[in-house]
């Protein structure tokens, strides 16, 4: 018995030492005196004087949903996000695509969220932009005291754009503290700024950070989260698969993934640039009059499981309908189905992987 107790105590102290070692290896937040490496202002929404960049992310091309009204709870009381929070979303929003930059700044001491927000609005208006929506505190909808972190409650305004799991900032760093701790006195606006090639969209969220533990050095400091979506043509690297190559793949493996059929975010309407791939599918089926196929829609993991399952099904139905209506394919040769997020071909942790998972697959039935 004595030997057993000694063993248990040794394991306990070893675990405690390990935990303390890991904890000490990650430094607490400190008041920033310089930008993090590789970060820079976006020309459309430059910094408030004296502030420093503590988190920075940039995507060459992605989609972005811009709230134009307060968040409201989903009509489905059981709808949950990836962190088991009740889903909130705005009734009005702008769904846009382009180059996205997200920057988090820590402001100088004694600067309020409202003061900083007003300064950013001045910058937008000076550039010929227009504020589309503005809100404060609980008026914004969702949990007004949460940033991107937390589960089991209500989604926050920050979570509508990104979750803590999307961040690349180290634990206890200034960036993690700025974007994943408690908040107070939330302010927000969305705007559009005319640019060559289309409108750019800018969202600015300001708040006071609240934390008395690892982020205590920044407690009470104002944080500004600036997101800019600039118009940019998508790099078309997914080439159109010709009918003959479709036939070869269906014969060899029984299926083929197609990336040339495009939809707007959260919609099942086929975009005009999908026509070359649809035409090749129709050529395939015309050349193989006895062939029947399943048209399977696939999504990434952004959003609820049931929602993506339904969305992928509606997109597959849209492809079937287009082949029947525009290209004269007999509908009995096509079966539409949705797989949602259930069959990824790449990791959903990065946008490049998510892009590979958003696809239409043809599966040979006979």
Image: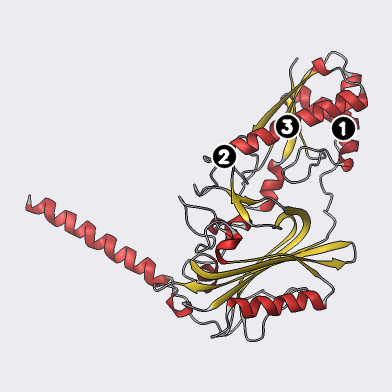
Q: Position of residue 132 (x, y in %)?
A: 75, 64
Mark 1 Cα shell of 10 Å, populated few (<14), some (14-19), many (≥20): many
Mark 3 Cα shell of 10 Å, populated few (<14), some (14-19), many (≥20): many
Give the left or right position of residue 278, taking residue 185 as reference: right
159 over 252 or under it: above or below? below
| Secondary structure under the numbered disc 3 in the rendered image | helix
Between the residue at mark 2 and the residue at mark 3, the CA separation in whole angstroms equals: 19 Å
User: Between 355 and 149, which is closer to the camera in this rendering?
Assistant: 149
The answer to whether one can see residue 361 in this image is: no
80 over 290 or under it: above or below? below
Of tags 1 and 3, which is closer to the observer? Answer: 3
Q: Looking at the image, which residue is at 72% across and 55% down?
A: 64
The residue that label 3 is drawn on is: 314
Of tags 2 and 3, which is closer to the observer? Answer: 2
Q: Position of residue 362 (x, y in %)?
A: 76, 27
**Quarter residue 283 falls in:** top right
Circle nearer the N terminus (1, 3) = 1
Circle nearer the N terminus (2, 1) = 2
Circle nearer the N terminus (2, 3) = 2
**Quarter residue 15 falls in:** bottom left
The residue that label 1 is drawn on is: 278
Q: Looking at the image, which residue is at 17% across and 58% down?
A: 9
Q: Looking at the image, which residue is at 92% across and 25% down?
A: 327
Between the residue at mark 2 and the residue at mark 1, the CA separation in whole angstroms equals: 35 Å
The residue that label 2 is drawn on is: 76
| Secondary structure under the numbered disc 1 in the rendered image | helix
Q: Position of residue 299 (x, y in %)?
A: 68, 39
Mark 2 Cα shell of 10 Å, populated few (<14), some (14-19), many (≥20): few
């Amino acid at each position: 018995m004595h030997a057993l107790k000694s063993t248990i105590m040794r394991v306990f102290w070893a675990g405690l030492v390990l935990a303390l070692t890991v904890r000490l290896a990650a430094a607490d937040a400190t008041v920033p005196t310089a930008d993090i490496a590789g970060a820079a202002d976006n020309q459309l929404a430059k910094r408030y004087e004296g502030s420093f960049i503590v988190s920075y992310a940039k995507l060459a091309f992605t989609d972005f949903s811009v709230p134009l009204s307060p968040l409201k709870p989903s009509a489905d009381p059981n709808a949950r996000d990836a962190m088991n929070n009740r889903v909130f979303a705005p009734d009005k929003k702008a769904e846009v695509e382009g180059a996205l930059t997200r920057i988090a700044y820590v402001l100088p001491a004694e600067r309020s969220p409202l003061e900083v927000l007003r300064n950013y609005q001045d910058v937008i208006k000076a550039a010929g932009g227009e504020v589309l929506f503005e809100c404060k505190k609980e008026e914004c909808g969702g949990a007004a005291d949460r940033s991107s972190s937390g589960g089991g409650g209500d989604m926050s305004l920050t979570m509508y754009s990104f979750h803590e799991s999307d961040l690349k900032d180290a634990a206890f760093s200034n960036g993690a503290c700025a974007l994943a701790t408690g908040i107070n006195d939330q302010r927000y606006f969305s705007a559009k700024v005319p640019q060559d090639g289309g409108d750019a969209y800018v969202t600015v969220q300001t708040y006071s950070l609240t934390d008395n533990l690892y982020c205590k050095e920044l407690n009470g400091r104002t944080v500004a989260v600036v997101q800019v979506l600039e118009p940019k043509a998508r790099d078309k690297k997914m080439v159109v698969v010709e009918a003959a190559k479709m036939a070869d793949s269906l014969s060899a493996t029984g299926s083929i993934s197609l990336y040339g059929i495009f939809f707007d975010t959260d919609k099942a309407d086929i975009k005009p640039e999908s026509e070359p791939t649809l035409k090749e599918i129709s050529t395939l089926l015309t050349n193989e009059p006895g062939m029947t196929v399943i048209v399977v829609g696939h999504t990434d993991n952004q959003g609820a499981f049931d929602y993506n399952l339904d969305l992928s099904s509606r997109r597959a139905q849209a492809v079937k309908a287009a082949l029947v209506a525009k290209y004269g394919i007999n509908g009995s040769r096509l079966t539409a189905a949705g797989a949602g997020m259930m069959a990824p071909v790449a990791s959903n942790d990065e946008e490049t992987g998510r892009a590979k998972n958003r696809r239409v697959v043809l599966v040979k039935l006979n």
